[in-house]
Amino acid sequence: MEIEDKIIEAAKEIFSSMVMMEIEVKEVLETHGPLTDTITGLIGLAGTHKGILGIHTPYPVAMAITSSFLGMDVAEINEDVHDAVGELANMLGGNVKSILSDNGRDIDLSLPSTIAGSEYNFQSDKEVDTVIILFDTGQGEFMVELDLEK
């Protein structure tokens, strides 16, 4: 699937250049269960393609990513972590927009937002095509999920 490869390429580039972390694809998933002790950065897509992109980062991974991103130790889930995860969703969303717009499609992005909790489900209420990629940072794993309305 073309979009899957481009999301992987974009995520690796963003993490390498902005977060100063090398990431590897662990596997491509069909689904995932409830998210536990996780923060999710979200960006909505609207226009000829409608959907949502989420980056699901367990708390320890979110803190490690934020520490590397900001160049400072982060020991708790705070505003910096929310901002960093939201910004990652924003950067990945921008890449997805340009991937889909390469095909002449017109798409707008929402403002990034984050949700966090001890246990929650992330799923669309509509019929969607879903891509879920599990990445390994060397300090834990995170998922990038793209749900596009069929």
Image (cartoon, grey):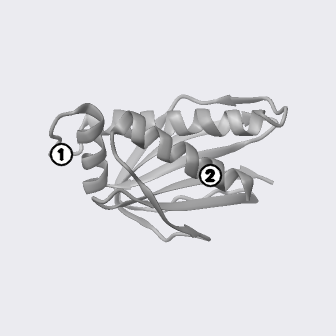
Residue 8, above or below 10: below
Give the x, y percent position of residue 43: 56, 38
Give the residue at x 58% y 37%. 93
How packed mark 1 is, by other alpha carbons closer than 10 Å (few <14, some 14-19, many 20 or more), is: few
Residue 99 vs residue 149, the one in the foreground: 99
Q: How many marks?
A: 2
Q: Residues within 10 Å of mark 2 (few under 14, many from 20)?
A: many
- The tag on residue 65 is none
* Disc 1 + disc 2, Cβ < 8 Å: no
> Hey, what amino acid is under mark 2?
Leu
Q: Amino acid at mark 1?
A: Glu
Q: Identify the residue at image location x=25%, y=55%.
A: 60
Give the position of the N terminus as an image quadrant.
bottom right
Secondary element at tag 1: loop
- The quadrant the C terminus occupies is bottom right
Counting from the top left corner in percent of width and height, residue 79 is at 27, 34
Please identify the quarter of the rendering in which residue 16 is found. top left
Q: Earlier in the sequence, mark 1 or mark 2?
A: 1
* Label drawn at residue 76: 1
Residue 96: image quadrant is top right
Of 143 and 117, the residue lying toward us: 143
Front residue of 116 and 41 = 41
Q: Residue at x 44, y 59 (%)?
A: 24
Quickly name the residue at label 2: 146
* Residue depicted at 35% across the width and 33% down the height: 83
| Element marked by disc 2 | strand
How far is the residue under mark 1 from the one under mark 2? 27 Å
32 horizontally vs 139: left or right = right
Query: Where is residue 98 shown, x and y percent of the image?
Result: 69, 33
Above or below for 141 versus 66: below
Q: At which x and y percent is residue 41?
A: 45, 43
| Relative to 37, residue 76 above or below | above
